[in-house]
Image (cartoon, rainbow, N blue to C red):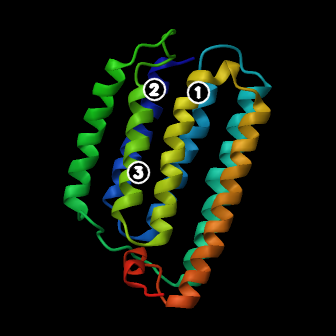
Amino acid sequence: MNPVWLDRMLAVIVVSAICLLGISRIGSIIKLFAIQSLVLSIIPFLMNGPLGVHRIALALVTFFLKVIIIPMILFWAVRHVAIRRDSPGLFGISISLLLGGFLVGLSFFLSSCLVLSEKPFSDLLIPSAFSTLFIGLLLLISRTKAITQVVGYLVMENGIFLFALLLFDVTPLLVELGIFLDIFVGVFIMGIVINHIQNEFDHTDTSQFTALKG
């Protein structure tokens, strides 16, 4: 393991999550999510211990699913709804970035309060996991376009992925593959739902759904 490179990769994941809060072009949001996932797929190679089948399979599945397949599904949905930009959202770009910085600080505070039976392979692992999870949640609740909200959900899942690395040695590969399958099915269904929303309402702004009448 190279701890310096591991910490750099974790820092890139958090910085990319913050940058997502400042982007309004949906294509750029999807590309940045793919870059974040690419860095995430490298993490298993930088962990402690021998490089076995479990790590290689986890990294390869993460790469093919989150760097190639899911972005392709999202770009397919973008082409069908013909939307190129998301609105600044509930808080606006500036306040969202400030909230992102606050959530990173909160993540370091919360991680310092946790008592673990074993020391994680990096001191930045838990703060990075909290930060990515919280920023993904912020992206999910603050944006109005359905596609950006899907990306927020996926960023949250990247944070959960980092948390799961704490239990890497005791989690069977079959369970992890099942989780990846659930993510793929979920994103595939959300892509279809977004397409149907566009066909029915001529937009994918979920904030307008509160005005619907039965």
Most foreground residue, 104 or 72: 104
Q: How many marks?
A: 3
- Amino acid identity at mark 3: Leu
Q: Name the residue under label 1.
A: 165
Residue 115 versus residue 151 in the image, above or below: above
Residue 61, given in percent of the width and then of the height, sits at: 72, 43
Q: Is mark 2 on a helix, strand or loop?
A: helix
Which residue is at 50% across, 59% downward? 151
Residue 200 versus residue 188 in the image, above or below: below
- Amino acid identity at mark 1: Leu
Q: Are marks 1 and 2 in contact (CB under 8 Å)?
A: yes
Q: What element carries label 3?
A: helix
Query: Which mark is on residue 137?
Result: 3
Where, by quadrant of the figure, is residue 196 drawn?
bottom right
Return the disc, 1 or 2, that comes first in the chain's sequence: 2
Residue 115 versus residue 108 in the image, above or below: above
- Amino acid identity at mark 2: Leu
Mark 3 or 1, closer to the camera: 3
Distance between the alpha carbons at the discs numbered 1 and 2: 9 Å
Most foreground residue, 162 or 190: 190
Q: Is mark 1 on a helix, strand or loop?
A: helix
Residue 18, given in percent of the width and then of the height, sits at: 34, 49
Q: Do the residues labelled 2 and 3 touch (CB within 8 Å)?
A: no
Residue 38, given in percent of the width and then of the height, sits at: 57, 45
Which residue is at 45% across, 62% downward? 29
Q: How crowded is mark 1: few (under 14 residues within 10 Å), some or many (20 or more)?
A: some
Q: Name the residue under label 2.
A: 125
Q: Residues within 10 Å of mark 2 (few under 14, many from 20)?
A: many
